[in-house]
Amino acid sequence: MRGSLRIARIAGIDIRIHYTWIFIFFLITWSLAVAYFPVEYPGWDIAVYWITSVAAALLLFISVLLHELAHSLVAKSRGLPVKSITLFLLGGISNLESEPQDPGLEFMVAIAGPLSSLVLAAIFWGVDTLGLTTLSPVKATVDYLITINILLAAFNILPGFPLDGGRVLRSIIWGATGNLQKATNIASTVGQAFGWLMIALGVFWALTGNLMNGIWLVFIGWFLNGAAESARRELELRSLWLNVRVANVMNDRPETIESVAPVDKLVNEVYVKRGMRTAPVVDDNRLVGIITLTDVRKIPQDTWQMTPVSQAMTRSPLYTVKPDDNMSVAVNLMAEHGVNQLPVVVEDRLVGMLCRADVIRYVQVHHELGRR
Ligand SMILES: [Zn+2]
């Protein structure tokens, strides 16, 4: 997810927070300090309300993190690599390197999250009943965390994809029918239905005097609805590329430029004449870099004649694909790094270029011909 910051590394997994989480953190702290704690536990000092609220919000953050770690650690222990965990606006997301390949594994990974939240609730409840919390603010925080972890488990186990419960539902249908596409369709339709239900209930709450909770519910419902929709689209897209290799879509005779050529030549002969915006830089058949219009814009125009391409080009990171790669790999790479073109290489020999425009043209032609 773009716009996120790495804060730690646990068991080889990068823990990142998205900037939206910082906003939510302040919002939660603020609403605890001025509304929730003063109403439930009147009579504390104002400073105590704020300190307790910061501690409760941090522990909420840790609860969400542990929930996500449970997903990730189960995935890792079953041989499914995990890139990172990102905490964002409405919770967390575990970025697995690929989707689980069988329904049993998907079930295990999905159920681990809500189970861990329930275990956390039980632990806090244990702390509470053992009477370890005689101090009022500590007891208030612990009680809050019991409620929050039960809510986390309850919300996530709703059977709408892409919530954990939706993944559980999908894995059960997938296991029963052997059809991932069908299972995803059903689970994400249920997910969208829950989204609409929350929006409707939220509007009802908002109109009947429960404004803040109503707005929150509408917001969460809207988010769930969108997530279900995009999860379904992503899978459709993946099935679109099922048997398509990069070699089928790429331009296999791309215009190239040598690293010693002046920028001037690049602009006139490649960008202007060929209508390209990016050129692979190739010396003796080997790809050594890539140069875009943006790179060139940084070079003063009056020096173009004597500046070699090698001075303006990007050497790394250089994202490349192989001709035998599946197109979904290339499309994901473009989306993930926000690049418009990928050099296609065999070892470090350039064999083609794949541009966003090629991808769109391929989809359009096949769409118009009615092929899938
Ligand atoms: Zn979860």
Image (spheres, rainbow, N blue to C red):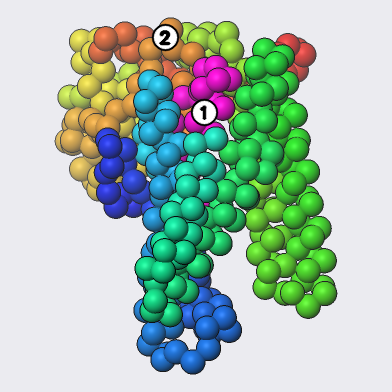
Tell me, for residue 108, which label it has, or none.
1
Of the numbered discs 2 and 1, the one sitting upstream in the chain is 1
As rendered, which of 221 and 53 lies closer to the eye? Answer: 53
Q: Residues within 10 Å of mark 2 (few under 14, many from 20)?
A: many
Tell me what residue is drawn at x 81 percent, y 58 percent. Answer: 200
Q: Is mark 2 within 8 Å of ligand 1?
A: no
Residue 274 drawn at (x, y percent): 45, 24
Give the residues in magenta: 90-110
Tell me what residue is drawn at x 62 percent, y 49 percent. Answer: 154
The N terminus, quarter of image: top left
Q: Quadrant of residue 283?
A: top left
Tag 1: residue type? Met
Residue 258 drawn at (x, y percent): 23, 20
Q: How many marks?
A: 2
Q: Element under label 1?
A: helix
Residue 150 drawn at (x, y percent): 57, 54
Q: Element under label 2?
A: loop
**What residue did someone put label 2 on?**
323
Specify whether 325 is left or right of 194.
left
Residue 141 drawn at (x, y percent): 45, 70
* Gap between marks 2 and 1 measured at Cα: 35 Å
